[in-house]
Amino acid sequence: MPLAVIAALAAALGVLVIPGLPLVVALRPRPLTGAALLAPASLVVVAVAAEGSHAVGAAWSLETPVIVGVIAGALVLATGRIAARAGRTTSRGVSPRGADDGDGPSAPSTPPAPTDGSPRARTLAGLLGLMIGGAVIVVRALHGMGGIDAISQTYDNIFHLGGVRAILDAHDASAAVVSTLNLPEGRSGFYPAGWHQLASLVVMASGQSLPLASNALMLLVGAVVLPLGIVALVAGCTRVGPAGLCAAGALTGASFAFPLALMTWGLLLPNFLSTAMLPTVVLVAAQALGLAPRVREHLRPLQLVIAAPVAACAVLWAHPQGLHASLVLVAPMALWAAVGGILAWTRGRRSRNSVDGRGPRRRFPLFACGAALVLLALIPFAWTELRPSRRASAWPAHMHIAEALRAGLGMSGAHVPPGVIPALLVGLAMLVVLVFSRSRWMLPPLLVNTFLFVAAAAFGDRDLRYLLTGPWYIDSYRPAALIPVLAIPVLAVAVDVLARAAGALTARRRAPAGRRVRAGSAAHRGHTAGSPASALVVAVCVLGLLAPAVRSPAAQHEDDLMDRYWQHPHVVSPDELAVFAQVDALVPPHATIIADPWDGGSLLWALEDRRVLAPTPASALSEDDRLLLRGLGRIDSDPAVCDAAARQDARYVFTSTEGALWRKRSPNRGPEDAARNGSAIELHRVGKAALWELRPCRGSDGRMELTGDG
């Protein structure tokens, strides 16, 4: 592996870990939960550091997030000590554990619920699953990309690379810098800048190119952050043993809908980052609502009070659609907890009022009911006031309802022929969880997200589609990405149930005559967790789900989709990149290049750090910009064009006769006209791409401009 790739990957890993490490260490969660919280904590710390630096006028640097992270860790540590002095902590951690039958994070303490397997076996199984799932994701992604330093040939990627370059040039990582990239001078707006802030740090730490740094960060988020969050969710919110933990990590590689689809189409990097951290939102929500059993990985109340806003803020800062995604995941969970809590409370009252007066004492689920009411009340506001305009939501339906249902449950997502077998297996897993597991609370949000995907992909009524999926631009790729967040845990729980049943069967057969292994006993759990039958069930289930994701007609279509968006030169061609490579030697750092943004010329700024008139195809053009891009061919005869070039210090021209993005017929014919009529001298050419220098021209005051003297 080249040193440049190692440097980029190491820098990306450091950016995802180091800023949030002091906060997580001070929080003192269990190792697996702590590892899952590192990326959200780091993003929150980086965001605070970026906006704080902007507010005080300090330059953006690698040290700033580290300092803010240390301060955040110190504040969390001080909070824990204050709570300890107030008598609200135990000897381990920062606050006491709640009870299974309580309501919310302040319930009294109870012992952890039993789980199959020793801590060592659970850790090794989780690591094995993470390695399998992460490896499948990386191999499939690199195969589709064509290499880790490839450039995504998508419209959005031009903006994302330009956003990182804007931060590096301005030495300011505030969202205000990224948000103004496409706006006229003097206008302000908001665009989620979490991805660009992290990527800028990777470039600064590694010294590598923007595409390599961005791709390294993308691969780590997809192959490490997401699987780690899924495994932590399963470990902290269910009673699964090693079999389920291994399956949870490994089966992240069975889904194309996420992360691979959002690493392909768009390129929706902010949305991708937000979705990858959603498992931590589900984790803290399930524990706060009392849906999760009291296992060893369970967070304590004060830990939850801190972890919940960290996870929520990270998801929201990465992309505002994280609010809608969190609502469709957590609101059904809160409603389930509220209804279940009320039913349990009612049964408890009836039992205590019976003749014998016995029965468990149950609290009224006040916290769950309040959370459900708040979240349900927030949904109408978010769906009407916090969504894109109808004009921007133009994606058409492209599937029949039955196809969309198979694609959603099978986790293949949008624009991919859905496989029947993966959908059937997920459906069977849901049935197993419904009948044999206490983790049924995962099913309502999974069904809601599947319904939203079906609505986006298959409903013919556009008004209804906009009503239901307007927050996602009625684009089916985005709701499809939410399905694996709970479909994979459901599969993991089902695999664990089957493995436990196989282990129990072999344990009974091997038990000595006259001796019975009681279900639920320590001996029973040890036999079921480590038996060859359990391992065989896990291997069969994991391979049965991974095989169609790697080798099948649907997988081939997915690979072709990635190839089209990564390796076909829709944005920038090899000839154009070869010309770009000579820009550093031929164009002074302060000069501006006149280039049509629709033929790849806008990437000259992001890739080579040379100013262009339009950094993205959607950039707002000034009068000078428009005059040069569309009328440069008149520079010898029209002094106004010469004046505009002089004001912009635009002495260089890039032309390409490669096909434009989206095969658009661009109106910006000025650069080609100037090259054709002899107004520019060719400096370097590779195939259909060329770099030119404008000849001196006469301005409106009669003086010669663009002489290269000033």
Image (cartoon, grey):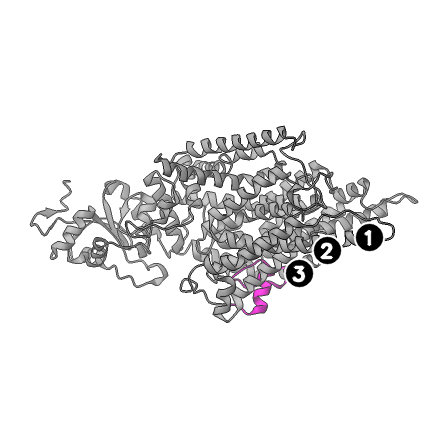
Q: Amino acid at mark 2?
A: Leu
Q: Amino acid at mark 3?
A: Gly
Residue wearing tag 1: 353
Q: Residues within 10 Å of mark 2 (few under 14, many from 20)?
A: some
Question: Is residue 626 shown left or right of residue 530?
Answer: left
Amino acid type shown at disc 1: Asn
Badges 1 and 3: C-beta atoms under 8 Å apart? no
- Residue 631 tag number: none
Q: Are marks 2 and 1 in contact (CB under 8 Å)?
A: no
The stretch in magenta equals 399-422
Circle number at residue 427: 3
From the image, state whether disc 2 or disc 1 is nearer to you. Answer: 1
User: Separation of disc 2 and disc 1 at Cα?
Assistant: 15 Å
Q: Say which quadrant the C terminus sits in.
A: top left
Q: Which disc, if any, is residue 343?
A: 2
Q: Is residue 337 visible?
A: yes
**Which residue reaches farthest left?**
702
Of the numbered discs 2 and 3, the one sitting upstream in the chain is 2
Image check: 221 left or right of 131?
A: left
Q: Is residue 140 positioned above or below 462 on the image? A: above
